[in-house]
Amino acid sequence: MMKISVLCIIGVLGWFPFVFAEEKPFVYADHGKRDPLWPLVTSSGAIMSYETEVFISDMVLEGVIIDPSGQNLAIINGVVVKNSDKIGQYIVRNISPSSVVLIKGQEEFILKLKKEE
């Protein structure tokens, strides 16, 4: 009977650290590969390649989230981006309620939010 009690106590104490362990948020390590949540095709049906040239004509501004503190977000081709993020070879310069300004080198491009009719 003593052996069973000792084994039960050891078993309970063995689980003790797991019961009170701090839960850490999961962070996906991409190891330099494409994010699995990015779309594989463009809205026109062309195969999307994030390592090669992405054309501005293949990008669709799907939504904008305006934050009063200035941390605006945009959804481009299903990818959520903020200022200074890269999407393909473009860098997000500015997000406004109806458009996003992207830069590539010295060129600026504007994606406009399409209004539903």
Image (spheres, grey):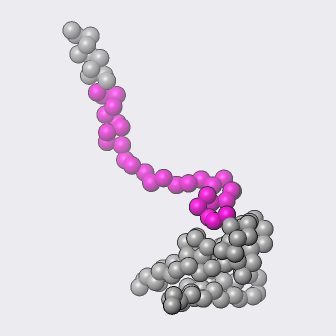
Residue 44 versus residue 84: which sits nearer the camera? 44
The residue shown at (69%, 56%) is 32
Q: Does 19 sit above or below residue 93?
A: above
In the rendered image, the quadrant that contains the N terminus is top left
Residue with the most extreme left position: 1
Q: Nearer the viewer, residue 89 or 44?
A: 44
Q: Which residue shows up at 28% across the image and 27% down it?
A: 12
Residue 10's quadrant in the figure? top left
* As drawn, 116 above or below 12: below
The image quadrant of residue 56 is bottom right
The residue positioned 31% from the left and 34% from the top of the image is: 16
* Percent of width and height locating residue 116: 51, 87
In the displayed structure, 104 sits above or below 30; it is below
Q: Position of residue 92 (x, y in %)?
A: 63, 80
Residue 18 within the segment the image draws in magenta: yes
Q: Position of residue 29 (x, y in %)?
A: 59, 53
The overriding secondary structure of the stretch rendered in magenta is loop
Residue 26, percent from left and from top? 48, 52
Q: Residue furthest right?
A: 52
Q: Which residues, given as a range, are shown in magenta?
A: 12-40
Q: How many marks?
A: 0
User: With 29 as the anchor, is 44 left or right in this view?
Assistant: right
